[in-house]
Amino acid sequence: MDRRSFIKKILRRFFPLAGAFALGVPVLSFITYRKPNERKVVFHPGEQLSGLNFKDGVFLERQGETFYALSSKCTHLGCTLGYDVLSSQFLCPCHGSVFDRSGKWISGPAKKDLRELSLKQLDNGDIVVVEKL
Ligand code: FES
């Protein structure tokens, strides 16, 4: 077998395999992709100050040794809420819904209270807040 026919033979076998791989990997990853159904936000001990703490879209309220977590997504259309220190209320910048500090709806187009999120405290002091998506 001369060099030219050897190279042709190699290329004839290589390109279909490379093509199948190049096409197969994205198709397989598309088929097997699953959207995550929850996300976790970890508050380390230094981020658990008394009062209201905010991290990655989660409000963590500390009252003594008790914690509860609220989603920062407005229950109307999902805008991220801001917290007004003077009135101690959550305010939606999009359409003006207002929630009290415990997440109860006060006024505006959102008619539901803020979602309370589940949390668990780890042995190392971290608090893991789980938000279902
Ligand atoms: Fe908050 Fe509309 S998204 S009031």
Image (cartoon, rainbow, N blue to C red):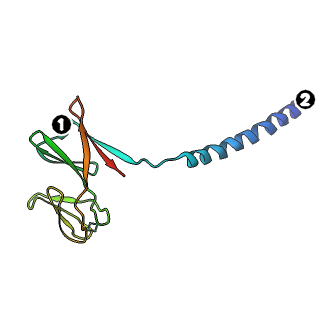
Name the side, left or right, on which 10 lies relative to 120: right
> In which quadrant will I find the N terminus?
top right
Q: Position of residue 21 (x, y in %)?
A: 67, 41
**Residue 127 visible:** no
The amino acid sitting under disc 2 is: Asp
Q: Say what secondary structure mark 2 lies in.
A: loop
Query: Which mark identifies residue 1?
Result: none
Ligand 1 is in which quadrant of the figure?
A: bottom left
Q: Position of residue 94 (x, y in %)?
A: 27, 68
Name the side, left or right, on which 88 lies relative to 69: left
Residue at mark 2:
2
Q: Identify which residue is drawn at 8% across, 60% down.
A: 86
Q: Quadrant of residue 13?
A: top right
Query: Which mark identifies residue 46?
Result: 1
Question: Who comes first in sequence, dot 2 or dot 1?
Answer: 2
Q: Residues within 10 Å of mark 2 (few under 14, many from 20)?
A: few
36 relative to 4, above or below:
below
Q: Identify which residue is drawn at 66% across, 46% down.
A: 23
Q: Residues within 10 Å of mark 1 (few under 14, many from 20)?
A: few
